[in-house]
Image: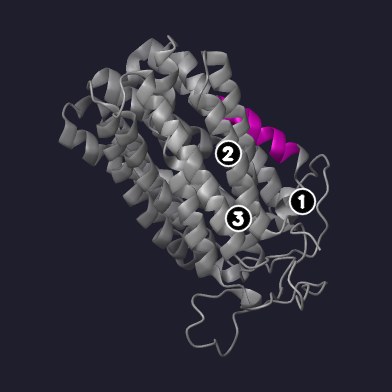
Amino acid sequence: MTDLIDDDRSGAVAPPAFEGTAPVGPPATPEPGAGERVAGGFQLRRFLVISFLAGVALGMTAPITVLFAQSFGASDAVAGLSWAAIAVGLATVDVFGTRFTPRLNGRMTMWLSLTIFSVGLLISGAAPNLPVMIAGRFVQGAGAAIVMSGAIQVVVRFTPPERTGRAIGAFNAAWFAGISVGPLAGGLLSELGDGQAGFRIAFAVSAAASVIVAIVARLVLPSIPTTKTPRLSLPERARPRPGLRVWPPLVLGTLSEGARGAIVFTLIPLFGANHLGLGTATIGVALSALAVVDITSMRFGGLLADRVGRRPVFVIALGIGAVTCLAAPLVTSLPLFIVWCAGLGIPVAMAWIIPATMIVDVSTDTETGLANYRIAADVGVASGSTTAGTAAGVAGPVGAMVAVGGLLAVIGAWVWRLPEARVATPEPHDELPLALPTD
């Protein structure tokens, strides 16, 4: 059998089909030394290690993309658009692959996405002009969409409902632990050459790293099959559980991803380069500081959200983000810039975890709910970065960041009133239990 839905090793056992929604917990007697496991014997630790390595490879160009675009003569608004171009690739895969990427073998999800992403990096890195560079971003988005939609489906599929926030937090923490290393490496690599030459070096090295991690994923990960056959189709509409609504978590996904893209990938690089006059390597250090806090918040914020609820955790994080963004006019030196970026790691982390967890809480079908969430998030990626670049061109990066702070405050006030943020006991997932062959 191919890697799509089954294992290619002899003696592999496909997971049984499952009907019903009986709650499932972790094994009563875990095997010694088996590592962290969730339902059905799926070993999470190995998957998280590959996710970390993928984050390293994919995160190298994060601090330099908009600056690379500006080296072609792009304005702040067009530079923001160059980042947002990745959302077109993301949306294309997420819209037409709602029953494809979530149903891929988890191993294939990792190596295929990295391979496609590396092709996009090579196109952008070798681009003779801005349109070709942006075309490469589209290909990168297609690759990123496979791992962003498929990997989280793998984690949720094998996780008992009472541990959904913890599992999503663990995956995102591993992913962004890699991405925290990536910006620093990308910034340093870009300093190896003058102007565009340095940016091109960083893109080329990131492409090579993506290919290496793809090979490692194919060799190291076990087969991680699903019970459903992958197929291309248009998305279905997610259906809510009784007394709940689907649209609030989806709107939150759009707003949260928009704010995240605006802050991390557009405004912080523009703030550092244009307002403080910092180099790309230094901006990479600041983004790595943000990522460290981001990772820590993801790892423990998901666990806390499972214990005390989604609403208080998200509202507090949004409040911290609002205050930090509104303090942008006070950031006038490198030490303050690094501390300020680190503070933004808390709302950035919860913007990833809480809306995704809420859609799992309220949807009758996990796969459809998360597919709808990914499309909503893609809209946020496109609109957030583009709007932030336009705002920075009009009001400067400081004024644009203050505006984002006001937006976060409004979102926090809305979340406090949402019943969907106060779901007490998540319902069992529709695909549990699943079992995998163990190595």
Magenta region: 85-95
Q: Nearer the viewer, residue 312 or 340?
A: 340
Tag 2 secondary structure:
helix
Q: CA distance from mark 3 to mark 1?
A: 19 Å
Between marks 1 and 2 in the image, the one whose residue lies nearer the viewer: 2
Instruction: Please state the horizontal and vertical placement of residue 364, each as a whole percent of the image.
Output: 75, 58
Mark nearer the N terminus (1 vs 2): 2
Looking at the image, residue 248 sits to the left or right of residue 182; the answer is right
The answer to whether residue 38 shows anywhere in this view is yes
Q: Nearer the viewer, residue 337 or 245?
A: 337
Instruction: Please state the horizontal and vertical placement of residue 277, each as a whole percent of the image.
Output: 23, 20
**Occupied quadrant, residue 344:** top left
Say which residue appears at 40% left-offset and 12% top-offset.
393
Q: CA distance from mark 1 to mark 2?
A: 32 Å
Looking at the image, residue 97 sits to the left or right of residue 183; the answer is right
Mark nearer the N terminus (2 vs 3): 2
| Residue designated by label 3 | 152
Mark nearer the N terminus (3 vs 1): 3
Residue most extreme to the bottom: 29
The answer to whether residue 240 shows anywhere in this view is no
Specify whether residue 174 is painted magenta: no
Instruction: Report the amino acid beneath label 3.
Output: Ile
In the picture shown, does residue 335 fall above or below 363?
A: above
Q: Quadrant of the N terminus?
A: bottom right
Between marks 3 and 1 in the image, the one whose residue lies nearer the viewer: 3
Instruction: Please state the horizontal and vertical placement of residue 385, each as a whole percent of the image.
Output: 49, 26
Q: Quadrant of the C terminus?
A: bottom right
| Residue designated by label 2 | 117
Instruction: Report the amino acid beneath label 2.
Output: Phe
Residue 239 badge:
1
